[in-house]
Image (cartoon, rainbow, N blue to C red):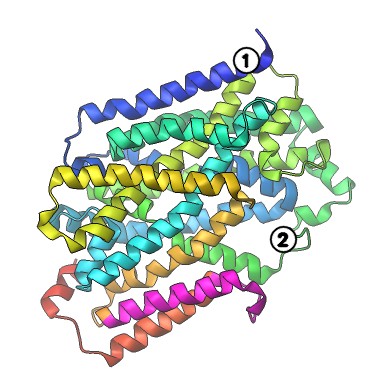
Amino acid sequence: METGTIILLVVGLYLLASLLTGIIPSLRISKSVSGYVAGDRSMNVFILYFVFGASIFSSVAFLGAPGWAYSRGAAAFYLIAYGVIGIVPLYFFGPRTWRLGKKYGYVTQAELLSDRFSSKFLSVMLAVLSVAAFIPYLTLQMIGAGYVLNVISEGLIPFWLGAAITYFVVLVYVYFSGVMGVGWSNAFQGMFMLVMAWFLGIYLPNILHGGIGEMFQSIADAGKGDMLTAPGLDAAGEPWSWSAYSSAVLISAVGFSMWPHLFMRSYAASSTNSLKLSVVLYPTFLLFLIPILFIGFSAVTAYPGVEQADSILPHVLMQLELPAIIVGLFCAGALAASMSSGDAILHSAGSIWVRDGIKPFYGKKLGDKTERLLIQISVLVIGLTAYLFAVVIDYSIVGLLLAAYGGVAQIFPVVFAMFYWKRATKAGALAGLFGGIVVNTFFLLLPELKPIDMHEGIYGLIVNLILITSVSLLTPRDPEEKVSKFTEG
């Protein structure tokens, strides 16, 4: 049997295992919307740990991180920097969210916020913002899957077909199983890719350079010392400014726990203790980014000139004389990274679009079965939309993620005000969120107009904070009974 055929067979078996792991949980979860969206609030620490971990260990980690290490050097440490602190807010927001969700039946982020500020418009605004941010995030997962299958098949499987095959599997188990299918598949995929990460991260520097220290020495000897000096290089290959680097870390840290698919897992926890322990354990996942970055650094001098940096991992694997089964397992690990985030994003996007964008206008008229069906249809539509973007877009995987973070970070001031500032008002929340999104989008589209080289999301946050504070102080207080429901305990 030819090498390429063996590799594809191994990857195919992995996809089948992922499908079964995602489908089986649907047999024991209720068919209600709560079961589909929040898993009947039954996730234990083990599942939550991998669900949280999958939020960062995606195509961004397995393909984008080596790609940045290969092309931009120390700039890739940005991923570790924001991940360490980005989960902290969920330790405080999460238990409050869980208690309110259990008592009042909330299952999405916007349900919580729109009830606190008594605004259907806020619910719809958050639904649109969330889905708009999810699509590029989901797109980059599909791009990663397409790269892997295209490279390991040596071009036999076109990029568009590789992405389609992988995400057909994801769509099937998300459609039928909902959040518990996402949780169990994340656990399976997470354990698989962590083993692959450590093996590759240690093996490649040794086989290509004789060790990790020798790998970095070869980069310095090749006249690429700038890649080893923080904050690394920018997209043009020039030294990245500290203002741009630090603002990228800050906006990502602020926005990390605000990603709706991560925030919503607070509702799925079996208890507040399970949730808090999962958050405390989460940073250990970042240890696995270290060997992933070694993969990219190991190829800098060993395989110079690879134009598509995000495909450096499968490219290196195909150049080495490894057994076909081993290459297949490593490529399956890269697919696991893509799928473990893509499924969570798909599920959350469909749930949010229906619960927050459509249901507020129907209220109780939207029956449980109808609502679940609409969520499933939305999953399919959003998946197809992201796929269309994936096959036509030409942009760095990590670059796509950074662009999405600017919009999501604008939710943070509103969530903080909901829980900790009694004087915050509906008008202030709407003004802050809307103003932050507009400013962020403006500088995203016209970066040359930035007065200082900082991430556009920082400008959005500045305007957001000014508006939510000033407008709240200038408008009448919200009803005390509504405010105390969210701020007490």
Asked whether residue 184 is in view, the answer is no
Determine the image quadrant of residue 324.
Answer: top right
Residue sitting nearer the eye, 277 or 365: 365
Q: Which residue is mark 2?
A: 234
Q: Say whether residue 386 is left or right of residue 420.
A: right
Asked whether residue 441 is in view, the answer is yes
Magenta residue span: 427-456
Tell me, yes or no, whether the highlighted magenta stretch contains residue 16.
no
Residues at marks 2 and 1, CA–CA distance in whole angstroms: 39 Å
The residue drawn where x is 66% and y is 18% is 4
Q: Position of residue 207 (x, y in %)?
A: 76, 27
The residue drawn where x is 46% and y is 81% is 463
Query: Mark 1: which amino acid?
Result: Thr
Residue count near mark 2 (Cα–Cα under 10 Å), binned few <14, some 14–19, many ≥20:
some
Determine the image quadrant of residue 422.
Answer: bottom left
Residue count near mark 1 (Cα–Cα under 10 Å), binned few <14, some 14–19, many ≥20:
some
The residue drawn where x is 64% and y is 31% is 150
Q: Position of residue 242 (x, y in %)?
A: 68, 69
Query: Mark 2: which amino acid?
Result: Asp
| Quadrant assignment for the C terminus | bottom left
Residue sitting nearer the eye, 112 or 49: 112
Tell me, yes or no, whether the highlighted magenta stretch contains residue 454.
yes
Q: Position of residue 96 (x, y in %)?
A: 24, 60
- Depicted 303 relative to depicted 27: above or below: below
Q: Which residue is mark 1?
A: 5
Q: Say whether residue 24 is left or right of residue 482.
A: right
